[in-house]
Image (spheres, grey):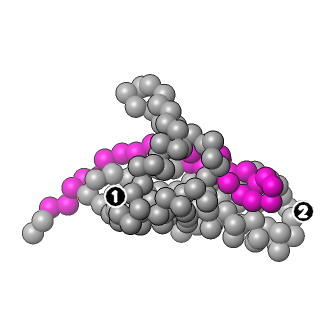
Amino acid sequence: MIKILETNSKSTNAFALSDLEQITEILLDYIEGTANGQPERLRKAFDPNFNLYTVAKDTLWIRSGEQYISNIKTGEKTNRIGSIVSIDIEKDTAIAKAEIVIPNQRIFTDYFLILKYQGNWKIVHKSYSWRELPKTEKT
């Protein structure tokens, strides 16, 4: 499910669809790249200088994007199921929300700040939170 919010009512549909398609593509590069062991797709989606932010034990935790991408092993598939929840576009700025489920373990909620510069959309910031999922009983 994708919820789209457009606040720039003066945009033409072709302009908005083109931007929406590009943003959706980079979010899928992130989702599918992490699930399928494709670090090159993450490099395509993210600005080279991005960082990841989360809170752990009531402390802000910052990790470099370079470190994050280096942990994605080429060809190593993971049991991650991702979906885009929402995209909100305003001119050359967008925010997006995605959920990543690791069955029987965790659900991550990711928030992205996405900017359009030099003709391309790039994720420049990722913040996330997660919670445990109950383990399903084997019968």
Residue 114 lies in the magenta-colored region: yes
- Residue extent of the magenta highlight: 111-137
Q: Residue at x 21, y 55 (%)?
A: 135
Which of these two is toward me, 76 or 103? 76
Residue at the extreme right of the image, as rendered: 10
Q: Is residue 94 above or below residue 35?
A: above
Residue 58 screen position, x and y as percent: 42, 25
Instruction: Give neighbour class at mark 1: few <14, some 14-19, many 20+ (Cα, 10 Å).
Output: some
Q: Residue at x 76, y 54 (%)?
A: 116
Looking at the rendered structure, the secondary structure element under dot 2 is loop
Q: Is residue 96 left or right of residue 136?
A: right
Which quadrant of the figure has residue 86? bottom right
The residue wearing badge 2 is: 10
Looking at the rendered structure, the secondary structure element under dot 1 is strand
The residue wearing badge 1 is: 102
Residue 117 screen position, x and y as percent: 79, 52
> Is residue 4 in view?
no
Q: What's the amino acid at mark 1?
A: Ile
The secondary structure that dominates the magenta segment is strand
Residue at the extreme bottom of the image, as rendered: 14
